[in-house]
Amino acid sequence: MQRFTLPDRDAIRGELEATADAFRALLASLRDEDLGRRGTGTRWTAGETLSHVVDSFANLPSAVAAARYGLDYMRPPLLVRPFAPLIQRIVVSRTARGRTRQELQERFDAAQQAALYLLDGVRDAEWQLTTRYFSQGALTIEDLFRLQALHFQEHAAQVEAALAAPA
């Protein structure tokens, strides 16, 4: 039987807080009109990309709940998977439409506070519970929390590329 080492809850909290600081800094570097800029290599605007990051944080409680109940989270059926990128594009476009930096910040702050509250409530026996999450396979509850920082970093680079692209 393999022993499980409990994750460092304080380290995860630090990652979430550092991600929040980085999100705020990136958002502060933008003007509202920059949210409509599109970089190379992505179909998403800077605003859509940031809205997608906010949605990821906001969906964390649901993903953790799915892991607690042994359910898949946002994993489309096989027949739908070829259309998943299009569906995601439509959803992201709609959730980002008309959002200002202020609104993105308010939504992110609320989602990040919920994530921190959720982190405090994870019981030791729950950390290894898994959910199949999108196309990423099985992720533990620890993975779901740690994914937030990685996800932001990936998309922050896309937003920065959009800002660097000629207007």
Image: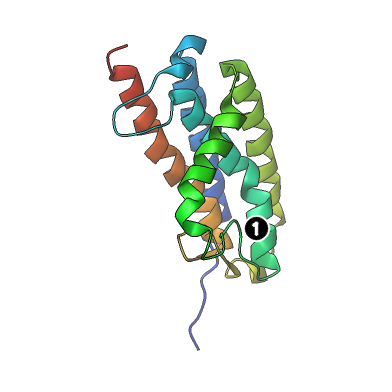
In this rendering, is residue 2 above or below 148? below
| Figure disc tally | 1
- x 49%, y 51%: residue: 83
Look at the image and tell me in which quarter the C terminus lies. top left
Q: Name the residue under label 1.
A: 64
Residue located at (59% from left, 16% from top):
100
Say whether residue 105 is visible: yes
- Residue nearest the observer in this picture, 88 or 50: 88
143 in relation to 33, above or below:
below
Nearer to the camera, 47 or 140: 47
Could you say whether the residue bearing mark 1 is in a helix, strand or loop? Answer: helix
Q: Position of residue 89 (x, y in %)?
A: 50, 38
Measured from the top left, where is residue 18 in percent x and y? 49, 36
**Tag 1: Cα neighbours inside 10 Å, few (<14), some, or many (≥20)?**
many
Residue 128 point in image, percent of width and height = 57, 70
Q: Residue at coordinates 51% horizontally, 66% vertically from top-left? A: 78
Residue 8 in sight: no
Seen in the image, is 109 located left or right of residue 35?
right
Image quadrant assignment for residue 64: bottom right
Residue type of the residue flagged with mark 1: Val
Percent x, y of residue 63: 63, 56
Image quadrant in which you'd find residue 90: top right
Q: In this view, does 107 lie above or below 15?
A: above
135 over 107 or under it: above or below: below
Give whichever of 10, 34 is nearer the camera.
34
Q: Which of 157 and 48 is in front in this view?
A: 48
Q: Which residue is drawn at 34% across and 32% down?
A: 157
| Structure colour scheme | rainbow
> For the view shown, which residue lies furthest in the bottom direction?
1
